[in-house]
């Protein structure tokens, strides 16, 4: 095997967190600062052998801890993990934005990074000037940049605003141009963080296609961080899972994504209740009291299978008397794919505790884990309250009548009615 284009060995990054002293003012006087400084110098020179003591106002935080991996040329690697796992810190070190505390990294080739909106752009310069600036930072000549210029502008779709300072760009325009520059100026390594989520769906699809092309057709390496597991699995053939700054898994993308989602589903719950009306989620118009998922055949068990009809009960306090209210239920997979959206009929609701019930038939959902988002809507257009990921539940598979036990494809698994019969019967063999 050839030498890797990215080698990370025992990489760690430490930050020191400061905590405000309770009961003291936030700011110190000049006298206090000078006094503390003199005391610190005295301790340093007069008592050099004194051991370090515990300081309750300063805490060491290891954003990365002993991380090691190799990436080969042309690999498309997804980096996943919960917020605070160390993903962004790792990318900043690989992009040479920050230095590691300990450990070693080796990079072969030019690196283009897109870690946040406007990475590498100067806000006072125009889009045209920033294209040349970014190319120069990557070590490209003016001739090389000029040869790619038209392609970059066409991809970013910012022709009309090319000579406008980028500080006047919207976040979407910023990202379009920044990604176009990063992807087209031929870096050997392309690093992209969750920033693509700023773009619209069409542009995200175009970006994923471009990253796939630069890897497969041009042999360039792509590192991709995203919370959209469907996008990550479609682009990456390998994934690295981080947890609390440590590398906990490294392998094929679909296997690592499944492990990550399963670990998150440990917090699953079939019912949530808020008894205190004043502190319950909501606002001055509506507040949530309870939501629960119930098997609609046998309430003595919580187990839900692909054949089980489900009842979703949603209780909320309505503070608007005689208003036209309807509920909007969204069911998502853990990968963020919307399975369906169902909207209730509008009814005139009095102020008080209201219950809405949605029935999902059996033989409809596929096996897997799902999340519920619920909206309370007034006059079919005004969203009074939207609670995302309000509840999660899992649908289990059952023993099948036919001898096949592979994964059933699709997010739904309906038991549709079929009819088939002979159209013509051969009296003799036609061949």
Image: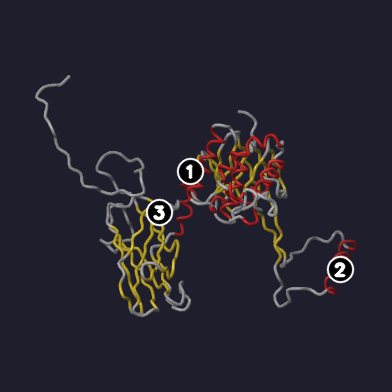
Q: Which residue is mark 1?
A: 233
* Left or right of residue 422: residue 300: right
- For the residues labelled 2 and 1, say whether their Cβ atoms are less than 8 Å apart: no
Disc 3 and disc 2: Cα gap in Å?
61 Å
Quick one: label 1, few (<14), some, or many (20+) residues within 10 Å? many
Disc 1 is placed on an element classified as helix
Q: Position of residue 269 (x, y in %)?
A: 41, 62
Per the rendering, the mark at residue 338 is: 3
Q: Using the image, determine if residue 362 lies above or below residue 427.
A: below
Quick one: label 2, few (<14), some, or many (20+) residues within 10 Å? few
Q: Looking at the rendering, in which quadrant would you find the N terminus?
A: top right
Quick one: label 3, few (<14), some, or many (20+) residues within 10 Å? some
Q: Which residue is mark 2?
A: 39
Q: Looking at the rendering, in which quadrant would you find the C terminus?
A: top left
Residue 22: quadrant of the picture = bottom right
From the image, state whether disc 3 or disc 1 is nearer to you: 3
Looking at the image, which residue is at 87% across and 62% down? 47
Scheme of colours in the image: secondary structure
Q: Using the image, determine if residue 118 lies above or below residue 105.
A: below
Looking at the image, which residue is at 85% across and 67% down? 37
Total marks placed: 3
Residue 357: quadrant of the picture = bottom left
Looking at the image, which residue is at 12% across and 31% down? 424
């Amino acid at each position: 095997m050839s030498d890797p284009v990215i080698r990370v060995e025992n990489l760690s990054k430490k930050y020191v967190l400061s905590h405000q002293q309770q009961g003291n003012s936030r700011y110190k006087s000049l006298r206090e600062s000078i006094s503390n400084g003199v005391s610190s110098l005295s301790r340093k020179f007069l008592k050099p052998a004194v051991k370090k003591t515990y300081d309750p106002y300063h805490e060491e935080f290891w954003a990365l801890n002993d991380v090691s991996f190799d990436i080969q040329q042309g690999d498309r690697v997804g980096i996943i993990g919960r917020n605070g796992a160390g993903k962004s810190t790792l990318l900043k070190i690989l992009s040479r934005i920050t230095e590691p505390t300990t450990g070693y990294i080796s990079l072969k080739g030019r690196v283009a990074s897109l870690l946040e909106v406007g990475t590498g752009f100067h806000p006072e310069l125009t889009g045209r000037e920033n294209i040349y600036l970014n190319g120069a930072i990557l070590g490209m000549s003016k001739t090389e940049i000029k040869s790619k210029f038209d392609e970059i502008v066409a991809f970013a779709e910012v022709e009309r605003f090319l000579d406008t300072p980028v500080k006047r760009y919207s976040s979407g325009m910023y990202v379009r141009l920044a990604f176009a520059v990063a992807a087209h100026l031929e870096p050997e390594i392309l690093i992209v963080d969750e920033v693509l989520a700023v773009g619209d769906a069409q542009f995200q699809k175009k970006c994923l296609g471009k990253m796939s092309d630069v890897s497969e057709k041009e042999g360039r390496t792509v590192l991709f961080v995203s919370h959209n597991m469907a996008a990550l699995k479609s682009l990456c053939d390998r994934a690295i899972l981080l947890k609390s700054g440590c590398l906990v898994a490294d392998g094929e993308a679909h296997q690592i994504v499944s492990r990550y989602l399963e670990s998150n589903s440990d917090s699953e719950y079939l019912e949530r209740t808020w008894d205190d009306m004043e502190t319950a989620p909501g606002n001055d118009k509506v507040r949530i009291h309870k939501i629960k998922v119930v098997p609609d055949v046998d309430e003595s068990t919580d187990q839900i299978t692909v054949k089980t009809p489900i009842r979703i009960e949603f209780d909320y306090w309505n503070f608007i008397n005689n208003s036209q209210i309807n509920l909007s239920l969204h069911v998502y997979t853990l990968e963020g794919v919307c399975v369906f959206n169902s909207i209730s009929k509008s009814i005139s609701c009095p102020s008080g505790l209201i219950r809405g019930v949605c029935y999902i038939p059996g033989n409809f959902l596929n096996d897997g884990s799902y999340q519920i988002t619920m909206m309370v809507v007034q006059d079919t257009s005004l969203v009074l309250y939207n609670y995302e990921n309000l509840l999660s539940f899992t649908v289990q598979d059952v023993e099948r009548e036919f001898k096949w036990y592979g994964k059933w494809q699709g997010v739904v698994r309906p038991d549709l009615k079929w009819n088939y019969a002979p159209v013509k019967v051969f009296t003799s063999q036609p061949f």
